[in-house]
Structure formats: C-alpha cells, structure tokens
Image (cartoon, helix red, strand yellow):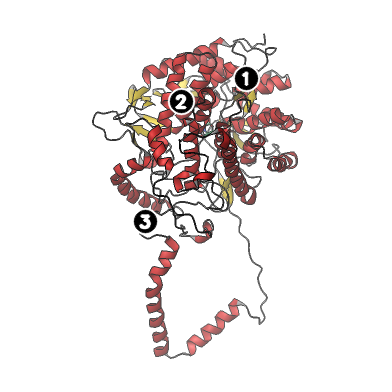
C-alpha cells in the first residue's frame, strides 16, 4: 500500500550505423534531393509548396478518419477500432465480424434476473448520459494534462476474444442459454473461456515482460516493483489449478534457475508476503515440489527483519538483501491491514519448517491489536505506530483500503487453525456487529445495501471496490457455523457489488463509488472523476465464487460471466495481456493505463475459474483457506491445533 517507487522499462533497439563512403543510404539520398531543391528557381519552389499544401488539405479527413476509426465518437461494435498511435496499439482485426442481433438475449435475461426496481446498465447509460458527456470533456482535459496515451476504446480481437452473447456471439457456442442459466453441459466451455483469458495474459507477459514484475501490455514492456518476477510467482498456482501444465513447467524452470532473493532490494512486507511467500507455499502444497518450499523458506527468513521494531509491530519495508527494515520515509506508522494480513502465511511457514519464530512474530501483532484502545465496536483505525504500538490517525473506520484484510484474516486464521483460537473469532464477530451498527446503510432509490465509512464521527456513503471481499468472507463464516444472518448480508452485499459493475457504461466497476441516500435521488450510485479507474481487481469475482460454491445459485455464475465479457471487451490488448483502464464510464474511451497487475492472474482469473467449476473438490473450502491474494493454504489437521497464545495443543 506504500509501494516503493516503481520503475518502468521499454526496450529500444538501435540500428547499426552505416560507413561514411558512397552508398544508397537514406542519408545520401536526402542530401541529393536537397541539392536538386536548391537548383530550382524561387517561383518553381513556391509552386511546388502550394501544390503540396493543397494535397495535404484534401487528404486530411481521410487520414484522420483512418486513424480515429469513428469521428462521431459512437462506438459500433461491428467496426474495427483503429489506433490513434498505431505503433502502440493492438493489430487491427482482420476478419469480418458477424452482425449484431436485434437484441441480445443476455440483455433480456439480465433484466429478468435483477430486482425489478433496478435498471440494467444499458438503461442506466441513457439516464446518465448528461453526466457522461460532461465528464467526457473533463476526462479528456485531465488526460491532456497528464499526457495519457491516446487510445480509443475496445481492444477486442475476434480471433482471441471469449465474447458471449452481449456482442452477438453465436448462441449455439455461447455458454449462456436462453433461460439465462449456465447449464452444466457447458461447464467445460466456461472453464475454457477462463483458460483462454489466462493464456492471452500469459502470452503478453511471456513476450514482453518475462521474469519481470508486471506487464505493460500496450507499450509491450514491463514495470518493476520489487524486481522478483511478481506476476510469474503470483500466477504459479493459478496455472496449476487451470491445468496449464506446459506454462506451469516453463514458469517453474524460471523459479529454479533465475529466481533469487539474494539481492539488495526494498520490498513491502505485506505485498511480498501475500504474493510471493503465499504463492510459493500454495504451489508447494498443490505440487508437492520441494523447490517451492525452499524458495518460501528463503523469502520468509529474509522478511523477518521487519519485525525488529521497538513495539514488535513490523515496519512496512524490508531490504531482503541487506537484512534491514524501515518504515516509509514520511512516517513511522504501518498500515493496520498490512500488519494483520501476513499471519496465514507465516503461521504456515512455521508449521512446515517446525521453526516457531515466524508464527510467534505474527501472533504477537494479533495479540497487541486485540488489546488496543481506539476501536469502534470492533472496527479498527487505518494506521498503527511501529514505535509505541498504538493506533494513529484515529477517526476513520472503513472496510476498504488499509483495513480490509484485517477482518478477512481474523476469520481465516480461525479457520486455518481448526477453529480453536477463540480470540480471533470473538474479534471477528464483534467487528461484523460493528459493521452492522455503524457502516451499513441502504441507497436510494433502490435500497441497495452498502458498507460506508465513518470519518471523524460522520457517516460517509463511500465504498471501495476492495470492500467487495466482504460478501465472500461473510459467506465463508456462515459455512463454518457462524450466524445465518451473515449469509443474508453476504447475499445483499453481493448484489450491490454486482450493481457496481453493471450500472457502469462499460459493465466494469470503478475503484470507489458513492451511494445516494437522500429521498428523490434518481440513481443509487455516483462515481467521482478521480475514482473511475478499474485495476482488474478480484474482490467481486472472489465473492461470487464463495456465493456460488455455497448456494449453487447460477445467477452468480451469470454475473461472473458478464464481468469476464466486459474485461474482454474493454481491457483486452490484442497483442497479449489485459490492461487497467482509467474510465469505466466511457465505453468509447476507457483510456488504458498500460498495466496488468499481478493479481489479475493470481486472483481474478483463478476465482473466475473456480466460480465456473462445479467440482467442490477443486480446492475444497473444507480443506483449504485462501490467503488474501487467492493462494490456497491447507486448513491444519487436528494434530496441529493452537490455543489463543499461539501454543500448540
Ligand atoms: C490484492 O493484492 C489483495 O487481494 C489485497 O488484499 C488487496 N489488493 C489486491 C487486489 O485488489
């Protein structure tokens, strides 16, 4: 959450220089033309220039039309969208696309399945059109100021796309049938669609970012955060689960031969724990290959200096080569979610290595946070000081950024340890009551249940997309014997998270929404200009997976399918990979960010695959608990149970 400065790389190849003697080089030809030009009379030169000017004016509309695709700005999904900066963009679609049907069945079905009072995205689009036009102007101004890459809308390529009915796909091939259900017989097709999305992402990563942290799919390059092959490690267990053996083997051999943690690099403790340590541990469990356990031990031990603080509340950053740790430059605080969402991984490392100090370090953090003053009915502030171990910047209570996974890990540690650590359960139950009492509200006009925030005693109807982990966590708790009303709340919040997608013009959720609560509102959800980006985040798909696993209600699969189609339509880059976008409210100009986050492969596509699978034993939720980066870790056998003090029973 406080990432060290990232570095972006684009490779440039330099052509070899020619010798100085005569040849037919461009340089020589240019010099000869210049000589001829100088030999012309002034009148001759003026006439040529006037002629060139007239030709330029005459051909301008054709050229701009070619580059921009459609000058009227109305997106026509039958047409090929052409790049403004062609060299940065996907290759144009070569094949003719099938014509759109009058009205796609998916649209009709979507209306039927939703509560009658809620409008679908397309109707919403009409209602919200005024706002969108206004915002478009503001957005493009912002982009001009920020110097964004010009890029026009969808990147879909019919050859590679996994499009369904929304864009007129042939119904026979579509997994969504006329009843809106996803029939069992098409399970294979659904899973295949996710595999295709993964393979397309992997192609981009392999071609342009192999061994680096993140793919930049538009510039066909990469960015480094820690310089540890983050996407590759995050994606290991996804490949295993999706059955992509060849790709898995290639990645494994990179881990075996190239991955080293023996380098002087600052990493964020939380991010590297959940993505790298978590990814390696889960891959070890799935494959039984000791290589991954060895690597997990290596990174785990290199992260431990973070806990050498006066309070034992860890610093945010560690240099894994030097063995030194520090807080961010501007503060001695750590983020509450970060220090309380590394426990599943270090506890498991202790169990596997029989070295208790990993477990002891993270248990100490939980023990201290459990006792701290400054909570609001079990809800925690966002920061904690590494010197004195107290909460700081108190007054903001949220289930979103900087607090989110604290709640998730209370429940999941309790499950991991065999439901014996009562303090974790008590803290979780109290926090959920705190959510109900302080943060839960309904929107107007349609009464969507949402989780807002408290800021210095005032309720704010703001909800991060990150909060959409909550329906899944509540459902998991209910599955493990917690009150049934947790499941009711999970279902209500799931509907809200889905509406956060479907009410946007691209069908993709923004990063943050604001709900309307006053009587007379015409729409439930507002999005501020600065909050309109979508980073390919997993939380909603994650919750859909839990809800489908536990209820078997096919509407959750339908919703996931719609989201996959929208990722394909608005974020897929035809040369490989998917990109975050800046504006989910503008289907004509979603404005790509040129970044594929590692969690798209680590989490989003993994949960999508599990959502479409009807096999409850494909990562059974009675045997595994997912860490907050979607890496499954085993629920401990009864021979390894802990008490509240972290002592084995
Ligand atoms: C992931 O790294 C984890 O899910 C984390 O808990 C929250 N942020 C991203 C995904 O949105």
User: How far across and how far down the image is residue 69, in percent?
Assistant: 43, 60
Quarter of the view holding residue 450 = top left
User: How far across and how far down the image is residue 57, in percent?
Assistant: 37, 74
How much space separates mark 3 and mark 1, taking CA atoms? 57 Å
Badge 3 vs badge 2, beta-carbon distance below 8 Å: no
How much space separates mark 2 and mark 1, taking CA atoms? 21 Å
Q: Which label sits in the foreground, 3 or 2?
A: 3
Mark 2 — residue?
382
Mark 3 — residue?
73
Residue at disc 3, secondary structure: loop
User: How far across and how far down the image is residue 620, in percent?
Assistant: 62, 24
Residue 82 against residue 515 in the figure, above or below: below
**Residue located 43% across and 45% down the image:** 582
Q: Earlier in the sequence, mark 2 or mark 1?
A: 1
> Which numbered marker is on residue 361?
1
Category of crowding for the residue at label 2, using alpha-carbon neighbours closer than 10 angstroms: few (below 14), some (14–19), many (at least 20): many
């Amino acid at each position: 959450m406080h990432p060290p400065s990232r570095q972006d790389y684009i490779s440039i190849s330099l052509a070899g220089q020619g010798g100085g003697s005569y040849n037919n080089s461009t340089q020589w030809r240019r010099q000869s033309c210049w000589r001829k030009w100088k030999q012309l009379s002034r009148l001759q030169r003026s006439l040529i220039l006037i002629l060139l000017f007239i030709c330029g004016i005459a051909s301008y509309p054709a050229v701009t039309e070619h580059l921009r695709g459609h000058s009227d700005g109305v997106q026509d999904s039958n047409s090929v969208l052409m790049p403004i900066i062609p060299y940065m963009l996907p290759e144009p679609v070569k094949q003719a696309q099938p014509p759109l049907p009058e009205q796609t069945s998916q649209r009709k079905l979507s209306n039927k399945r939703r509560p009658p009072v809620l409008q679908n995205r397309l109707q919403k689009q009409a209602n919200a059109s005024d706002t969108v036009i206004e915002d478009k102007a503001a957005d493009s101004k912002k982009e001009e100021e920020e110097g964004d890459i010009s890029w026009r809308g969808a990147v879909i390529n019919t050859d590679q796309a996994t499009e369904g009915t929304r864009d007129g796909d042939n119904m026979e091939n579509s997994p969504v049938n006329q009843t809106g259900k996803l029939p069992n017989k098409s399970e294979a097709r659904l899973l295949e669609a996710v595999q295709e999305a993964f393979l397309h992402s992997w192609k981009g990563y392999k071609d342009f970012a192999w061994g680096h942290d993140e793919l930049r799919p538009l510039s066909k390059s990469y960015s480094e955060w820690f310089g540890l092959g983050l996407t590759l490690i995050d994606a290991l267990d996804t490949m295993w689960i999706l059955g992509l053996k060849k790709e898995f083997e290639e990645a494994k051999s990179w881990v075996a031969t190239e991955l080293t943690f023996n380098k002087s690099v600052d990493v964020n403790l939380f991010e590297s724990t959940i993505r790298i340590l978590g990814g390696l541990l889960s891959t070890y469990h799935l494959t039984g290959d000791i290589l991954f356990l060895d690597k997990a031990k290596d990174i785990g031990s290199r992260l431990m200096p973070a806990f050498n603080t006066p309070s034992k509340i860890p610093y945010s950053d560690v240099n894994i080569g030097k063995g030194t740790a520090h807080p961010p430059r501007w503060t001695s605080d750590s983020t509450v979610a970060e220090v309380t969402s590394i426990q599943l991984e270090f506890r498991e490392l202790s169990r596997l290595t029989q070295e208790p100090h990993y477990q002891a370090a993270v248990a100490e953090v939980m023990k201290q946070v459990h006792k701290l003053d400054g909570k609001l009915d079990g809800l925690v502030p966002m920061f904690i000081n590494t010197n004195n171990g107290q909460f700081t910047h108190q007054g903001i209570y949220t289930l979103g950024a900087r607090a989110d996974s604290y709640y998730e890990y209370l429940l999941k540690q309790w499950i991991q340890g065999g439901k014996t650590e009562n303090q974790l359960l008590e803290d979780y139950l109290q926090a959920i009551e705190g959510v109900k009492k302080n943060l839960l509200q309904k929107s107007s006009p349609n009464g969507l249940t949402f989780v807002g925030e408290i800021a210095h005693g005032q309720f704010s109807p703001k909800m991060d997309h990150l909060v959409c982990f909550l329906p899944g966590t509540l459902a998991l708790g209910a599955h493990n014997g917690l009150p049934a009303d947790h499941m009711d709340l999970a279902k209500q919040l799931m509907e809200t998270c889905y509406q956060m997608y479907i009410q946007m013009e691209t069908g993709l959720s923004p990063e943050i929404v604001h709900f309307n609560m006053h009587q007379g509102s015409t729409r439930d959800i507002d999005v501020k200009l600065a909050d309109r980006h979508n980073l390919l985040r997993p939380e909603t798909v994650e919750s859909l997976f839990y809800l489908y696993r536990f209820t078997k209600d096919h509407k959750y699969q339908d919703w996931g399918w719609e989201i996959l189609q929208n990722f394909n339509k608005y974020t897929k880059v035809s040369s490989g990979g998917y990109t975050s976008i800046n504006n989910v409210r503008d289907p004509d100009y979603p404005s790509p960010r040129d970044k594929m986050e590692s969690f798209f492969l680590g989490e989003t596509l993994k949960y999508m695959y599990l959502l479409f699978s009807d096999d409850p034993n494909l990562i059974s939720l009675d045997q595994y608990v997912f860490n907050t980066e979607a890496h499954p870790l085993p629920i401990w056998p009864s021979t390894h149970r802990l008490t509240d003090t972290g002592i084995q029973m």
